[in-house]
Image (cartoon, rainbow, N blue to C red):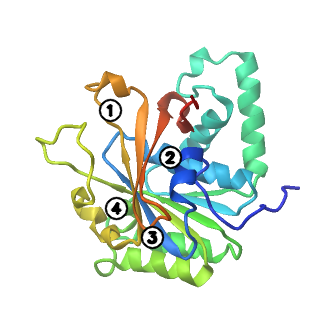
Amino acid sequence: MIPSPPTDEIFTGLSDFDALAGPILRGRVTVAAARSSTGTTAFVLGVARHNDEVGHQVTIASFESGTDTLMGNLVAATTSVNVDRPLSINKGRRARIERARAAMEQSRLSMWSSELKAGKWPFKDLSKQLAARPILDLLVVDGYGLASHGEPSEGATFAALQHLARERNIAVLVTAYLVPRDDTPETDLPALTELSQLDGSVAEAETVMLLHRPNRNETAPQRRGEVDLIALQGWDTTGTATVRFEPEYHRFVDLPNT
């Protein structure tokens, strides 16, 4: 039996950021926004995995990936095995994968995915699924823009997420995309004003963090592997904590303490 969590608070599991910014608050929507190829999906999967491990009830809802992909990414992060290169996986690593997958399937972490279909509001399908989960601590929504496709009115998806967070007193963490101008150097810090058209409604969120990967196109080798987690607004303390992104394992980890 998984033990009850020692606290009701929801954290990212990344020590430096949590120490800086405090918990992801219940009762509100928290936005994690970033430019492409920054690792937002890996980040929120890590948050989900951490909270599942401490005993919280977590649902991951992806509008970008299927559940098989989500499971593979979670297993890679847990086992330190690059599941994207199956030919290099030996017997011992395969056994680790199988154990991790079995443990994941027996955990209370639930996964849901939806493929975008024209003329349909994908978030509506998710709402029906969540109604069947009376106990929930954290909802991760990966791909806000796709979730809101075909919404009945502008901002309806975000309003529904806010209502869900407040009514059930859960933490809701959503990903959104930033689209910089063509002449913006990748080393420049991102800004909320770069939100894509589909993600514009999340600018109303009370709590926002930005992810910045200055070397995503390998033009800043001195920052190789680093991502800045920027607590922009709504946190206990605003500021920046730097972590390491390991794309081969689909995970974020703390930098070594020195």
Q: Which residue is mark 3?
A: 123
The circle drawn on residue 88 is: none
Q: Quadrant of the C terminus?
A: top right
**Residue 120 position in % (x across, y down):** 37, 70
Which three-letter amino acid code belongs to the residue tagged 2? Phe
What residue sits 23% from the left and 37% below the top? 186
**Residue 126 position in % (x across, y down):** 52, 69
Callout 2: few (<14), some (14-19), or many (20+) C-alpha neighbours within 10 Å?
Answer: many
Which three-letter amino acid code belongs to the residue tagged 3? Phe
Vertically, is 172 above or below 162? above
Q: Which residue is mark 4?
A: 145
Callout 3: few (<14), some (14-19), or many (20+) C-alpha neighbours within 10 Å?
Answer: many
Q: Which residue is mark 1?
A: 216
Vertically, is 163 above or below 95? below
In the picture, measured across the screen, residue 226 lies left or right of residue 255, that is: left
Q: Nearer the viewer, residue 62 or 3?
A: 3
Splitting the image into 4 quarters, where does residue 52 fall? bottom right
Q: Nearer the viewer's eye, disc 4 or disc 1? A: 1
Q: Secondary structure at mark 4?
A: helix
Q: Earlier in the sequence, mark 2 or mark 3?
A: 2
What residue sits 70% from the left and 76% below the top? 134
Q: Secondary structure at mark 2?
A: helix
Q: Nearer the viewer's eye, disc 3 or disc 1? A: 1
**Residue 188 position in % (x across, y down):** 23, 42
Which three-letter amino acid code belongs to the residue tagged 1? Arg
The circle drawn on residue 43 is: 2
Kindly check if marks 3 and 1 are in contact, taking CB atoms under 8 A apart as contact. no
